[in-house]
Image: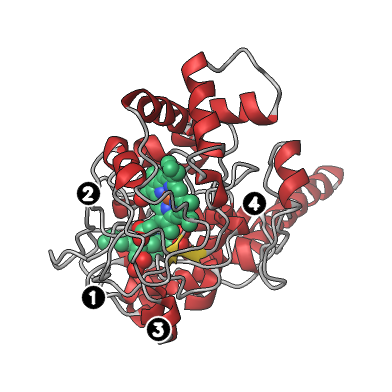
Amino acid sequence: MRKKILVVGILTVFATIYACKKEKKTAPLYNPTYTTVDVPAFAKTYLGDMPHPADNPLTVEGIALGRMLFYEKMISNDKSMSCASCHKQANAFDDPRPFSQGTNGVFGDRNAMALVNMGWDRHFFWDGRRSSLEGQAHDPVTNPIEMANTWTEVVTRLQNSSTYPDLFFKAFGTNTVDSSLTMKAIAQFERTLVSFNSKFDKYHHQGDTTVFTQQEKNGLNIFAGKGMCNNCHLMNTLLTDRDLKNNGLDVNPADAGLMKFTGNANDRGKFKVPTLRNIEVSAPYMHDSRFGTLEDVVNFYSSGVKQSSPNIDEHMPDFGSGLNLTAQEKADLIAFLKTLTDQTFLTNPKFSNPH
Ligand code: HEC
Ligand code: HEC
């Protein structure tokens, strides 16, 4: 009798464990881990905490899902291309090709953009037509010269996959995939792409005076002094003022830039001031990739600026005949620009392909 009770007892225990396990599988708990992006103290002092939309706080699970989606080729119409096909980590998430090629083989007419410290940005795309990362992520999916897909198709594919519904549940508490949650997750991952660990940061922000060579110091003095680069590419942290401006590339801009979006003639020729962080690895340069090297860029600022360009920015120095840097000054300025490279950003395993 005692034996029988013992056996029944043991069986009951096993049955309960089994039931619990089963229960767990069908109804997992939604328990996201809220988190923030780690930035050094000097960056926090200038920038404050990274803002995010009230309905899209950062969670460990949301970032992990966003990273999967950023590298997900299923998002493009023929499953050949992910966001990372044009935004490559080794190039600061820029595209080394002058113009990105979409799934249908057609080239776009603008250079892809580096994705760096975007959590503090206010305008997205060269012409600033999007005002949030969540809104931005909508466009490449349906752009006919990028991923050429429809959101309905993307949502169906993700819903039918064996992994994504579970990941959406962990991130957002529902395993019903939709476009808005997809864009939220991608935006969360993009907010983690912060870069503040360059030689420049150690020298300028963290007081380690030993890391700069004399040439790099001379270059910094030109950048912040007679070159006036610091007027727009602010050295305090982001190396951009996050605004849209005309730096005088053309007398007659072929691409209207911000005006394309606002329709306002006063915006003709204005483009997003890009960050110069990791600029060494994000060639080619300018919205239309007109310059292949930093030498080309510096030559432009030295003697190629078109003062008659429409709406040229008041912060663009006008020295009459130009800045006219000497060969030595140009080399110094370029040496300084290369101190903005952050190897830990370019190789951080947290940003790499998780598939
Ligand atoms: C075919 C290449 C291509 C693909 C694929 C692509 N992009 Fe881009 N991306 C670009 C180009 C080109 C631009 C600049 C376009 C413009 O300004 O009109 C850009 C701009 C951006 C920007 C604006 C950055 C800034 O500083 O304003 C973000 C953010 C971005 N892409 C994220 C993504 C995400 C997320 C995906 C995947 C859902 C993606 N991209 C897929 C080529 C691509
Ligand atoms: C009036 C503001 C302003 C000043 C001053 C300025 N820039 Fe720029 N810079 C811009 C804008 C705007 C762009 C993007 C223009 C475009 O693509 O149409 C840009 C682009 C660049 C690029 C290419 C970035 C990329 O990702 O393609 C580099 C490099 C650069 N600037 C370096 C400098 C240097 C060096 C100086 C000083 C000699 C300088 N800039 C002065 C506004 C400015």
Q: How far separated are the C-alphas under marks 4 and 3?
A: 44 Å
At label 3, which amino acid type do we have? Ala
Q: How far separated are the C-alphas under marks 3 and 2?
A: 31 Å
Which of the two discs, 4 and 1, labels the residue nearer the N terminus? 4
Q: Mark 4 against mark 3, which lies toward the viewer?
A: 3
Residue annotated with mark 2: 97
226, above or below 182, in the image: above
Q: Mark 2 against mark 4, which lies toward the viewer?
A: 2
Q: Is residue 114 visible?
A: no
Q: Is residue 174 visible?
A: yes
Tell me where residue 350 appears, x and y as whole percent.
Answer: 52, 39
Q: How far separated are the C-alphas under marks 3 and 1?
A: 28 Å
Q: Is mark 3 within 8 Å of ligand 2?
A: no
Find residue 60 and name its label: 4
Q: Is residue 114 left or right of residue 194?
A: left
At label 1, which amino acid type do we have? Pro
Relative depth, front residue between 201 and 66: 201
Residue annotated with mark 3: 265
Tell me where residue 158 appears, x and y as whole percent.
Answer: 40, 69
Total label count?
Answer: 4
Residue annotated with mark 1: 144
Tell me where residue 264 appears, x and y as whole percent.
Answer: 43, 85
